Amino acid sequence: MWLSLAGLALSGCQRVQPEDTTPFVRWAPQQVIDAFRAAGLEVAEPRALAGQEFGFSPLLAGEGIQFQMPTRGAGKAGRVVSFPSEANLKKAQLYYAQQSLPGQFGYTFARANIIVRIDGSLAESAARQYQTVLAALP
């Protein structure tokens, strides 16, 4: 009797698929900066972003680095920001897509947990070089 009840109880059970435990975070901002340098892209005076320097994303982002591009002109800069979750990254992408700030971080490129923002006054071909390196990260 016990075996038949146990058999009935088990026959209604479904196999549960294991949860995906792949971490969302693949790269740190410094790894992206290093890849930009290795590709010969301009990444001068990198420094960690803190607090309000993140703008919209201080509560969404994990860490970030801002860098200068002085040969492109005074004040030309870029940022590499990592996000701890896909939900946070998507919120930031939506926010950035809705912004229309000419001359300020006009190019936004994303891959995995990273968003790269490049000064909008750069020629598109120059900005896309950073996107190409981001896309080639292992």
Image: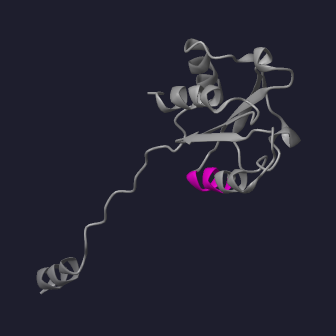
Q: Residue 104, percent across and down? A: 80, 39
Q: Is residue 6 above or below residue 129?
A: below
Query: What is the quadrant of residue 130 in the picture?
Result: top right
- Looking at the figure, which quarter contains the N terminus? bottom left
Q: In front: 100, or 1?
A: 100
Residue 80 location, x and y as percent? 68, 32
- Please indicate whether residue 61 sits to the left or right of residue 73 in the image: left
Q: How is the image coloured?
A: one colour
Q: Residue at 83%, 45% (x, y): give it.
A: 55
Q: Position of residue 122 (x, y in %)?
A: 72, 29
In screen coordinates, is 23 left or right of 52? Answer: left
Vertical order, 55 against 44 (above or below): below
Return the x and y of residue 64 as percentages of the image width and height. 72, 34
Residue drawn at x 60%, y 56% as measured from the top left: 87
Front in this rendered view, residue 84 or 116: 116
Our reading of the magenta stretch's main secondary structure is helix
Q: Please tell me which residue is depicted at 83% across the width and 35% down the height of the picture.
A: 50
Task: Count up the numbered dots.
Answer: 0
Residue at coordinates 49% horizontally, 43% vertically from top-left?
A: 23
Find residue 118 and report its image quarter: top right
Q: Quadrant of residue 70?
A: top right
Quadrant occupied by the C terminus: top left
- Closer to us: 131 or 10: 131
Tell me if 44 is positioned left or right of 52 in this view. Answer: left
Residue 119, above or below 102: above
Which residues make up the magenta segment? Answer: 86-91
Question: Is residue 45 shown in magenta?
Answer: no
